Image: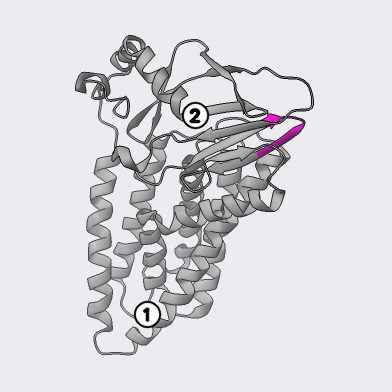
Amino acid sequence: MKSAWLYAEAYEAKERTEQLRQLKLNRDAVTDYVTRRFAVAYDDKPCAPTTVGDADVRLRGKTAFAVLTLAYACQGGEGGAHAISSALFPDAESFVHSTKTMVRYDLDGETSSAVLDATNPTLRVGERPASHQVWEFFLLGAEHLAFGLDHIFFLLALLIGARRLRDVVVTATAFTAAHSITFLLAAMGVVDVPGQIVEPVIAASIIVVAVANLLGREEDKLGKWRLPIVFAFGLVHGLGFAGALDIKESGSWELLLSLLSFNVGIEATQLVIIAVLFPLLVLLRRTSAARWAVAAMSVPIVAVSLYWFFDRIPLPL
């Protein structure tokens, strides 16, 4: 609604009823915005878009998004090929940045997934090999973890509390196994937990681990409970990773390949962070400033996570 340059009352509506009303009132403007930036072609001839039904509203976290269904009528003989292009929400509009459009398609006898962005805005069906699909979703997973400050904070809190390399390996393995389970189950449509529940719990998980680091001296205050706690919170973080893809349907083998690639990207980035930070933390613990350093790193993590926790709790309308 904001990108379509509508009046403030259109995109500042809070209640679902009013959001749907504004979408209906501004249907032409919203449809025009989308259809001018998202296109389907057949043998390089544009396909004509028409809207199907009314626009809906879906919440991701505390943010409302419009959901539009479009049908494209394509003309041409058999044996041709489709192309899909997206220039939705470009950086030039200044409302959002580095937007990526995830496309899942079943066209011309091929079923697959792809990621479109400013550098690769067009997909020509049949021209991208499976390896390209794997690489696209690998990068998407890596970027999601690298720029997801809450997941970085949780990983950092775990590293601060780990005393030995064995602790890091066991903890990281438990976290990986847990979030891989729920990530795949949620992204494949088997489990569905609202983001309004997942996001505050992710913030709470960071607080618990960071506070345990502050309370610890020579011994780990979480003790024997560290592994099950990390595993439990890993299950929640997996739901958060799945929410990033916003996939609500049961999947196929092609979708599973994309999901696995996304997850491997997350794991690879996590391992790189561990490989870089843990040796530095080991060296720091050998200095006289070790105790103060733990506090200096943990207190900001707790403070920011507390803000996230209260900010992510949905308020009654």
Q: Does 190 sit above or below residue 168?
A: above
Whether the residues at callouts 2 and 1 have beta carbons within 8 Å, the answer is no
The residue that label 1 is drawn on is 281
Confirm whether the magenta stretch covers residue 98.
Answer: no
Which type of secondary structure does the marked residue at label 1 adopt? helix
Which type of secondary structure does the marked residue at label 2 adopt? strand
**Residue 40, horizontal then vertical, whole percent:** 58, 27
Image quadrant where residue 247 sits: top right
**Which of the pair 173/71 is nearer the observer?**
71
* Neighbours of disc 2 within 10 Å: few (<14), some (14-19), many (20+): some
**Residue 213, horizontal then vertical, whole percent:** 32, 69
**Which of the pair 166/223 is nearer the observer?**
166
- Residue 38, label in figure: 2
**Residue 257, horizontal then vertical, whole percent:** 68, 47
* Neighbours of disc 1 within 10 Å: few (<14), some (14-19), many (20+): some
Magenta range is: 106-112
Image check: 186 left or right of 282? right
Residue 58 visible? The answer is: yes
Point 46% across, 50% down: residue: 237
Viewer-nearest of discs 2 and 1 = 2
Q: Does 249 sit above or below residue 258?
A: above
**Residue 253, horizontal then vertical, whole percent:** 72, 40
